[in-house]
Amino acid sequence: MQNFDFYNPTHILFGKGQIAAISAHIPAGARVLLTAGGGSIKANGVYEQTMKALEGRQVTEFWGIEPNPEYATLMKAVEIVRREKIGLILAVGGGSVLDGTKFIAAAAEFDGEPWDILTKGAEVKRATPLASILTLPATGSESNTFAVVSRRETGEKLAFGSPKVYPKFAVLDPETTFSLPLKQVANGVADAFTHVCEQYLTYPAGAALQDRFAESILRTLIEVGPKTLSNPTDYESRAVFVWSATMALNGLIGAGVPQDWATHMIGHELTALYGIDHARTLAVVLPHLLRVQKAQKLEKLAQFAERVWDIREGSVEERAEAAIRRTEEFYESLGIPTKLAKYEGIAAETPQAVAGKLEKRGMARIGERSDITPAKVREILALSLAA
Amino acid sequence: MQNFDFYNPTHILFGKGQIAAISAHIPAGARVLLTAGGGSIKANGVYEQTMKALEGRQVTEFWGIEPNPEYATLMKAVEIVRREKIGLILAVGGGSVLDGTKFIAAAAEFDGEPWDILTKGAEVKRATPLASILTLPATGSESNTFAVVSRRETGEKLAFGSPKVYPKFAVLDPETTFSLPLKQVANGVADAFTHVCEQYLTYPAGAALQDRFAESILRTLIEVGPKTLSNPTDYESRAVFVWSATMALNGLIGAGVPQDWATHMIGHELTALYGIDHARTLAVVLPHLLRVQKAQKLEKLAQFAERVWDIREGSVEERAEAAIRRTEEFYESLGIPTKLAKYEGIAAETPQAVAGKLEKRGMARIGERSDITPAKVREILALSLAA
């Protein structure tokens, strides 16, 4: 096992009616900025529950954080936080609202040009306290340090991370997710599944418990994903999915193990170029990446085959390939194509373009062994583009 | 799944040489009280590493916290904390030093008689900040809210819990545990294993992921326990065991599920009466409790049989019984007798005595369904006392 730091101070408030519980976590008279996306939280009652729980606080509202939150939009909220001397930013919505809010919180206290946080890895020394009422289980952003922000004018989608942007608390009420479009639920299952794979499908590192935890989340998502899609208002399966998505990216299964975030890095470029949903970009990359890196990941792929997919027949290579096929079938069963060729308007030169963009960003060697070169990125995307 | 709060802000510093990392977490000039047990941390180099990392701080030392930490001892440290205006108490040692330190931290800031925290459940509103360098993996105390304190004069062993006593940080360096007596390592494996069972072997509650996490820890302990006992200086297996013990009782697998702490409650009375090691009292209670409660726990016992012990033959009852037998065999394989009859000096009236003591403490109905009555406690201990 590798040495590690594990620190996750987010207070999770999980279950039915838990929005009301936030009042115990926000001082009376606090100056709160509520951040949100479109109007879905008004339609499903979440906004009303939230405002009721915020009674007695000075609440300012900032609406319009879009999917793949946009730098220019977020900077408008930064002005409000500074001007209104906001003490807590409360993100109400899905992963994009929350990611955007993390950036707002960091940028509001940043000396200099906040864009540097994303492009130059400038250190986040302080951040306005933030918290979340999460209505879309997927990204794990509700209890992790990461956020992704886009800038359309330059076609960029960039990540940052800092322990300063851990949400103080996060409400996870599965009932608030019942009204989600099924496509977003499917994306959430795929996103969480991929997060686990990226922390698990590397090489053996003597981390037996982290491996079993990762396998636990994968098996649970495989069981519960189809259930919660076919019966979206079944509390039990939705609750299990919501908690699985949180656990998939809260630092737990990644502690002390090698990680391979190449799928995310490649996927971000596809979203930046074509606007493909984040989770779908992961599904069009991961299986092909696993094939290209099969030799390097062979032991873990065989373990994945046996413990997650119950595949015990055949050679190690055959079991690894069978597990990759099952992974593809799983994404497809969620209604998510795993071939880039199935998405509209994809240019033939995409593999070259993405490889070039990553190289330009200083990501010429990615993956857990830093051996995913631009040539391999091209190979992965060429496989995905082949019909 | 039941509604739950999950909050665990302890910063874990895991791995080789991590004691040095504490200096980043303690301000220069801080007034630190180092708490410890006997001299083992001097023999194994932990004390020296700790003092080096504490250079520049004002360090007072308090030695002599005994196994099953004693109220009278701890109150002496409380005086020092108050008198010296200690800003951080650093527990260096095993679970007893840490549990004692949690009580010191709570008692030092308590208005009134601190004994009430243990006997009357008086609320802990504040506590002196504390942290830990843990040298004995077992109790999970390094990142949870619980502590157990004894008072020999009255034969009492009592628990309290408060989020105020979460350690700020906990160092887990597996190498610092290499010199432990094997008996203590075996006890640690048994303690962690039992912690998981008490949060898992209840009734199905729609918490699929928590179940799989619990099963993950159990399987890992079953694999790694014998390895780390037969090869105590093998870093890899020790590291896996250390992390498993932390995960067994840090709130994670208990979130949103029913729990049955009756084994601990009965076990505490056995330690108070006879001084039997804590973990050993759990091993002489759990299997017999599972038999007495077999009908109530049948579904989870069958799941435990299949997923943890790979038992798939026979009726549900037969599989449940087989899993209980395997659990007994596991404790015995660690060198821990599961029959109270095997310990010296146990009075024949022990079942009555323990049941009476629990009843007197207001614990007349314990277990996840509050159906473990004094009559059942007597039955459990009578089974354990039968040769």
Image: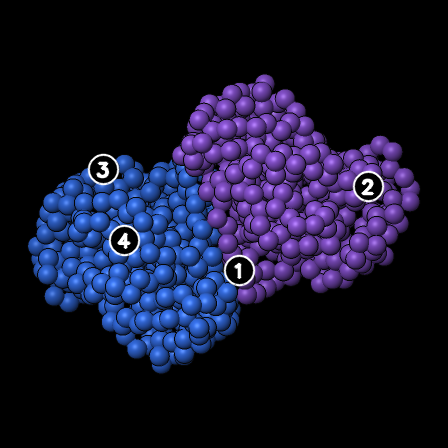
Chain colours: A purple, B blue
Residue at position x 31%, y 49% from top? B126
Q: Nearer the viewer, mark 3 or mark 2?
A: 2
> Of B284 and A94, which appears nearest the observer?
A94
Q: Earlier in the sequence, mark 3 or mark 4?
A: 4
Q: Are marks 2 and 4 on the same chain?
A: no
* Local SS, label 1: strand
* Local SS, label 3: loop
Residue extending farthest right: A348
How much space separates mark 2 and mark 4, taking CA atoms? 56 Å
Residue at position x 91%, y 45% from top? A349
Dot 3 amino acid type: Asp
Dot 2 amino acid type: Gly
Q: Nearer the viewer, mark 1 or mark 3?
A: 1
How much space separates mark 1 and mark 3, taking CA atoms? 42 Å
Q: Nearer the viewer, mark 4 or mark 1?
A: 4
- The residue indicated by pointer 3 is B371
Quadrant where the image shows the N terminus of chain A: bottom right
The answer to whether mark 1 and mark 3 are in CB contact below 8 A is: no
How much space separates mark 4 and mark 1, taking CA atoms? 30 Å
Q: Could you tell whether A45 is left or right of B56 in the image?
A: right
Which of the chains bears the disc numbered 4? B
Number of on-image labels? 4
Taking the image as drawn, is residue A251 in sight? yes
Residue at position x 36%, y 61% from top? B87
> Of B339 and A243, which appears nearest the observer?
A243
- The residue indicated by pointer 1 is A5
- In the depicted structure, whether residue B62 falls above or below residue A145: below
- The residue indicated by pointer 2 is A155
Which of the chains bears the disc numbered 3? B
Quadrant of the rendered image containing residue B169 = bottom left
* Local SS, label 2: loop
